[in-house]
Image (spheres, rainbow, N blue to C red):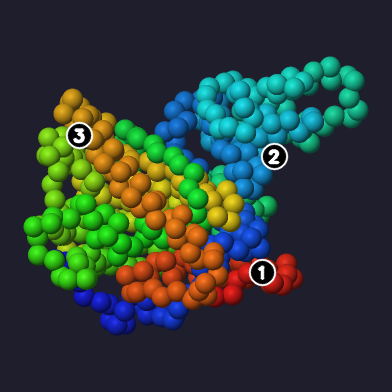
Amino acid sequence: MEVFDKPGAGSWTSWFGLDTGPVSFRDSFDPAFYELEKDAVFRKSWLNLGRVEQLPRRGSYFTKELKFLGISIIVVRGMDEKIRAFHNVCSHRGNRLVWDDYPDRETRGMCRAFSCKYHGWRYSLDGQISYVHNAPEFFDLNADELALPQVHLDTWAGFIWINLDEKPRQSLREFLTPTVAKLETYPFEKMTQTYVFESEVEANWKLFVDAFQEVYHVPYVHGKLNNPAAEQTGVDKIPFMIPYWAPYGKHRLFSSVGPLGNANLRVRKAADALFQAGLLGTDYTPDVGPLGDGVNPGGIDRWGADSWQIYPNFVVVTWNRNHYFTYHYWPLSPTRHKFEWTVNFVPPTTTRERLAQEHAAMVIREGGLQDAATLEATQMGIASGARKQFFLCDQEVAIRHLHKVAQDDVAAYAREAGLTGNGTDR
């Protein structure tokens, strides 16, 4: 079984510079905190909306509905190849500009211009007005004033990011920190066979982030993966442990041995053996060349995976078998969110590789369903008010870090705005 050394500070929690006392999860159900969090966290942070592969050629676009903020975003590759983002609002009467059958649903496509369904106003792909129906009937129109409201956008490692703040306080690279930014040398662009899973979850968005930033739960939530013939350790069962944790600004990383760890304690299912794939990916490892100098920053032996928890709601998991995951957690209410998960492989070159990838994607989905199965019960428990404090172990340091960062951001925003009673008590 895998047991790893602690850092020189004696615990990972101390190494992060965090308090080791009980925590409050009021930030995961309190409506007042949620309202402030939308402005303090999501309107002030860089948010990932997707990847450049979603815009393969000039005129490609997609929309992103940020319903919890009441806004819709158009992301488009212009005729000059530049990627831009705009608020999805016509300058004439405020009609949603780009939509198909239902204006509140996301869409994607190809076009040479955006045309409003209401009165036919058209905009070029750089956001400028190009046509006003019956323009002489208007008064003193100024083309500059009619342009679509632009949103700050930048790209990193092929990922597309926006910032909704009027004047972002940091560039995207500054926000990511130098260590996270080094991950841009990873060959994401070679892993374009993508499987997407989406679900609306009856729990605060941070609670699902928490479920994926520790492995303390694995022996119980994923108990069916354990080998019942292997030696157990009484009530402690199997101590799945993480060998390296690190904070990078508002972000967190944990590195693990991934598929190389606890192999004798896992059970191999017949279907996994048949398709040569399972929860941890495919058995084969495609050649993608160097993985860059961003992976395994802790230099652990037998590196298997890095889980990059990029604040506030985006996660990238890079695996030693040359595939990667992404997770997005989009709030819908104080106790509900939309979860988006992508599994990304190198495009298969044989039927066996295709079957292995599809089987892995389905088993990975099952693992995610097991993780999600506890969340509604957690939401009910913390919101009941029966307890005010909860107790985290050292292997849950990333949970402690996320909640502190979010609470600190909300408290700072409340102070700047002169607000009181902001629900940030810990």
Q: Which of these two is toward me, 80 or 194?
A: 194
Please provide percent x and percent y for residue 119. 77, 20
Q: Quick check: 293 above or below 52?
A: below
Q: Identity of the amino acid at label 2? A: Pro
Q: Which mark is residue 229?
A: none
| Residue of label 1 | 422
Dot in front, 2 or 3: 3
Circles 2 and 3: CB distance less than 8 Å? no
Label 2, label 3: how far apart the Cα atoms are: 45 Å
Q: Quadrant of the N terminus?
A: bottom left
User: Can you see residue 317?
Assistant: yes
The tag earlier along the polypeptide, 1 or 2, is 2
Q: Quick check: 95 above or below 11?
A: above
| Residue of label 2 | 149
Please provide percent x and percent y for residue 2. 16, 66
* Residue drawn where x is 27% and y is 60% of the image: 220
Q: Which mark is residue 356?
A: 3
Q: Quick check: 393 above or below 10?
A: above
* Residue drawn where x is 13% and y is 47% of the image: 268
Which structural element holds mark 1?
loop
Dot in front, 1 or 2: 1
Q: Which of these two is toward me, 209 or 131?
A: 209
Please provide percent x and percent y for residue 248. 42, 65
